[in-house]
Image (spheres, coloured by chain):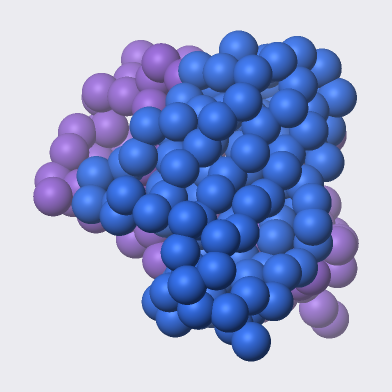
Amino acid sequence: EVQLQESGPGLVKPSQSLSLTCSVTGYSITSNYWGWIRKFPGNKMEWMGYISYSGSTSYNPSLKSRISITRDTSKNQFFLQLNSVTTEDTATYYCARMNSGYNWFAYWGQGTLVTVSS
Amino acid sequence: AIVLNQSPSSIIASQGEKVTITCRASSSISSNYLHWYQQKPGAFPKLVIYSTSYRASGVPSRFSGSGSGTSYSFTISRVEAEDVATYYCQQGSSNPHTFGAGTKLELK
């Protein structure tokens, strides 16, 4: 069974970088697409980007200058880095496996709350 | 970006009642790329319907979806207590993939 688990700091200071890890078990990240989605207080959901089975990436244009998604295939993990965070980046961050055809998210991590505050 | 206008924002329904949520896209989407999720409090979103009308594995038959072009709908034929959740539509047709604002379903 595919399982995803996010990990990383729950508190980040403004202007610093947010870094999260998604650890995947039961499926290789060298297949399919692997994405990050966040949910803001108030319920708005935002797709942030993905990394593909080959390592190529695609990002939400609203984040393009601040976001990087990378991976470590030897550990079956992929990573999110978001630079220059502000309080508006406070959200629950989810990693998910994205269907490579029609781009639905069938498997999700439990989510991790990241608060940006000084 | 394709904006998904989801309505209503909240529904209060009785057990056994039929409820319908609509999702209108700002541009036409192939029906293959429109999906629906259920998120219960404190849990991650769960895929319920993919490609407009296909139920995900294990999803009860009371959940259904339909639509085309810019207009899509999601229906629960007979609401049960366990269906209390927020429901989201999502399009995977173009970057950025976007979500509707969500519909919160509560029981009367």
Give left or right: position of B13 versus B44. right
Furthest-bottom residue in view? Answer: B108
B32 up-or-down from B39: above or below: above
Q: Is residue B93 visible?
A: no
Q: Quadrant of residue B72?
A: top right
Give left or right: position of B54 versus A70. left
Identify the residue at horizontal 71%, vertical 69% (top origin).
Answer: B11
* Total numbered labels placed on residues in the image: 0
**Rendering coords of residue A43 (x, y %):** 73, 65
Give left or right: position of A108 versus A61. left
**Rendering coords of residue A96 (x, y %):** 42, 45
Quadrant position of the C terminus of chain B in the picture:
bottom right
**Rendering coords of residue A89 (x, y %):** 78, 60
Quick one: B69 or A14, which is closer to the camera? Answer: B69
Q: In which quarter of the image is residue B81?
A: bottom left
Quadrant position of the N terminus of chain B in the picture:
top right
Q: The purple chain is which one?
A: A
Q: Can residue A87 be seen in this view?
A: yes
Identify the residue at horizontal 47%, vertical 26% (top origin).
Answer: B51
Q: Quadrant of residue A21?
A: bottom left
B102 up-or-down from B80: above or below: above
Identify the residue at horizontal 70%, vertical 15% (top origin).
Answer: B69
A39 up-or-down from A87: above or below: above
Identify the residue at horizontal 52%, vertical 64% (top origin).
Answer: B39
Give left or right: position of B9 versus A11. right
A10 up-or-down from A3: above or below: below
Quick one: B107 or A35, which is closer to the camera? Answer: B107
Q: Which chain is blue?
A: B
